């Protein structure tokens, strides 16, 4: 099987290369020098704990314990690993979920060691997870992510074709890891209909960078007005109720930079986007896409929303 892989789009540049997936006795080589397979041994589950600590900078918050991982793996869940030279460098962890009459796979964690985060591993772990879940006879994967993290939004919404459907304020309560400390843990719940025509088309041909075609953003109504501070960081100054059938909801291009350069800036973004998302969802809008654009020479990120009918049918 041949799979096309595309780098995270950035203004004016996109690189595509192809790699043939190769099955070996130790797993499936989905990227050059990286094997993917289900995890099995106690040592591998403990290695997942170390990747968690490395990826999130865990100090006080404990990682998911290895015995729980074994229980998940042996009872309908999935623990999938990516190995480079026999070392675990990334994993995907999930379990069965149910809401109403829908049974789905809930993807609780996907993490890659910081030294490997520029090598497409997170994206490829999601594709591998999709294949394993389809083999279980399920057609839907769900997960939550921080709506202010632009890299996660780009991968989850734009590249994979997932659909954020619900805003969850303060979802996890206070967390002390290096990524979440000091910021309320709001999340978007995303549904990924992995057998739908929309998702299949998105995966067959990776979307081109939106810098080349800002027409949709140009005609969209901005839910959040922003301004650049003397620090060089853009922060929100006001929110507005929806005023058009197409909306643009801005987030910071680099939340870590906001936290470093502008005291209180991350909290301002959290409050503004919470209001904007909750208002839009309450008025029947849905998230349709996510884009990174060059606006006046400045890179900026936006969720795009509309009120069009659902097109996620299988």
Image: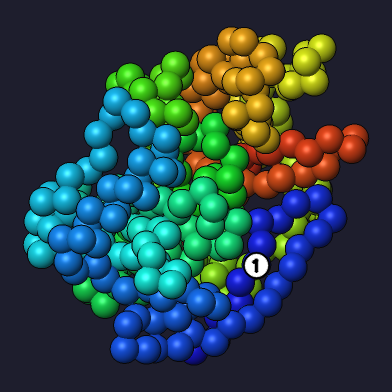
Query: Which x, y percent locates residue 144?
Result: 37, 42
Q: Secondary structure at mark 1?
A: strand
Describe residue 51's horizontal placement relative to residue 278 as left or right. Answer: left
User: Where, by quadrant of the figure, is residue 91 drawn?
Assistant: bottom left
Between 107 and 118, the residue placed more toward the observer is 118
Q: How many marks?
A: 1
For the question of whether residue 188 can be seen, the reply is: no
Dot 1 crowding, Cα within 10 Å, few <14, some 14–19, many 20+: some
Query: Which x, y percent locates residue 86?
Result: 37, 71
Between 171 and 34, the residue placed more toward the observer is 34
Describe residue 124's horizontal placement relative to residue 205 as left or right. Answer: left
Image quadrant containing the C terminus:
bottom left
Identify the residue at horizontal 28%, vertical 55% (top origin). Answer: 47
Render colour scheme:
rainbow
Identify the residue at horizontal 28%, vertical 48% (top origin). Answer: 49
User: Where, by quadrant of the figure, is residue 175 drawn?
Assistant: top left
Identify the residue at horizontal 66%, vertical 27% (top origin). Answer: 257
For the question of whether residue 152 can be seen, the reply is: yes
Return the residue found at the far right: 296
Between 263 and 304, the residue placed more toward the observer is 263
Query: Which x, y percent locates residue 289?
Result: 59, 49
Describe residue 227's horizontal placement relative to residue 245 as left or right. Answer: right
Query: Which x, y percent locates residue 104?
Result: 24, 58
Identify the residue at horizontal 60%, vertical 20% (top origin). Answer: 259
In the picture of the structure, the residue carrying the numbered disc 1 is 6
User: Where, by quadrant of the figure, is residue 73 drawn?
Assistant: bottom left
124 is higher (above) or lower (below) than 30: above
């Amino acid at each position: 099987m041949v799979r096309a892989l595309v780098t995270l789009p950035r203004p004016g540049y996109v690189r595509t290369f192809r790699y043939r997936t190769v099955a070996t006795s130790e797993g499936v080589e989905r990227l050059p020098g990286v094997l993917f397979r289900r995890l099995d041994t106690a040592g591998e589950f403990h290695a997942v704990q170390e990747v968690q600590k490395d990826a999130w900078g865990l100090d006080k918050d404990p990682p998911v314990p290895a015995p729980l991982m074994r229980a998940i793996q042996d009872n309908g869940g999935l623990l999938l690993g990516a190995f480079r030279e026999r070392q675990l460098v990334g994993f995907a962890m999930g379990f069965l979920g149910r809401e109403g009459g829908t049974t789905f796979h809930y993807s609780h964690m996907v993490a890659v060691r910081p030294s490997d985060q520029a090598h497409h591993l997170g994206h490829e772990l999601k594709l591998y997870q999709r294949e394993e879940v389809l083999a279980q006879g399920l057609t839907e994967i769900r997960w939550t992510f921080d709506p202010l993290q632009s890299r996660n939004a780009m991968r989850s919404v734009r590249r994979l074709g997932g659909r954020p459907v619900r805003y969850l304020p303060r979802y996890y309560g206070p967390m002390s890891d290096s990524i979440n400390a000091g910021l309320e843990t709001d999340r978007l719940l995303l549904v990924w209909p992995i057998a739908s025509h929309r998702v299949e088309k998105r995966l067959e041909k990776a979307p081109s960078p939106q810098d080349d075609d800002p027409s949709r953003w140009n005609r969209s109504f901005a839910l959040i007005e922003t301004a650049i501070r003397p620090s060089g960081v853009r922060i929100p100054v006001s929110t507005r109720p929806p005023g058009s059938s197409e909306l643009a909801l801005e987030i910071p291009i680099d939340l870590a930079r906001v936290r470093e350069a502008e005291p209180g800036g991350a909290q301002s973004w959290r409050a503004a986007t919470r209001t904007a998302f909750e208002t839009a969802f309450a008025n029947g809008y849905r998230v349709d896409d996510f884009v990174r654009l060059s606006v006046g020479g400045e890179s900026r990120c936006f969720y795009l929303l509309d009120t069009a009918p659902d097109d996620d049918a299988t």
